[in-house]
Image (cartoon, grey):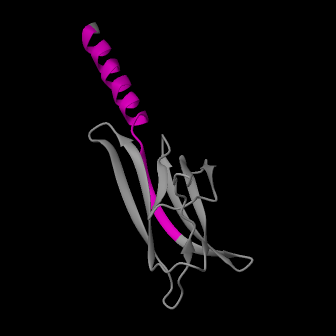
Amino acid sequence: MMGNGGTLVLVILTSIFMARSHTKVVHLSTHLESDNGKKIAVCKARHTMIEPTLHWEPPLSVLYSYFTVDYNNASSTIENRVYLDDHFNIIELVCVATYPSPMSGSVRLKKTLQLPSGERFCLRIKEDTPEKR
């Protein structure tokens, strides 16, 4: 009887550990904002446990990222913002949230940001190119 109690406690502790080591993105969203006439693409991922990484497709230079905590429902939000310029035509951006998964190594969620029709923006794309000698 004492062995059964110890086994039960071990199973409960193992379940708690597995739940804490698994990240779950519960909501991924994108939207456009404006700041002094500049358009900003915004991607937000609400998650539990370990925060995911966020990036844009096509790759963009990120203005900044920041992390906020929402204590009311035990989740956190990470946000990624990038300024869009007026020199390059593009119709949509895709925000990708990547987080670790014990089953498959990592999981990627995607959310598309459609730019309003008639508007096109330039993306500041950071490239590593060798200097001319």
Front residue of 48/90: it is 90
Up-down: is 5 above or below 119? Answer: above
User: Percent position (x, y) of residue 32?
Assistant: 57, 74
Farthest residue toward the bottom? 118
User: Percent position (x, y) of residue 10?
Assistant: 33, 18
User: Which residue is located at x 42 percent, y 43 percent?
Assistant: 23
Farthest residue toward the front? 133
SS majority, magenta: helix
Up-down: is 42 above or below 121? Answer: above
Viewport quadrant of the N terminus: top left
Within the magenta stretch, is there residue 49?
no
User: Percent position (x, y) of residue 83?
Assistant: 62, 68
The residue segment tinted magenta is 3-30
Front residue of 47/51: it is 51
User: Which residue is located at x 53 percent, y 83 percent?
Assistant: 120
Farthest residue toward the top? 2
User: Which residue is located at x 28 percent, y 8 percent?
Assistant: 2
Say whether residue 36 is left or right of residue 111: right
User: Which residue is located at x 57 percent, y 59 percent?
Assistant: 61
User: Percent position (x, y) of residue 122?
Assistant: 56, 75
Up-down: is 34 above or below 69? Answer: below
Up-down: is 70 above or below 10? Answer: below
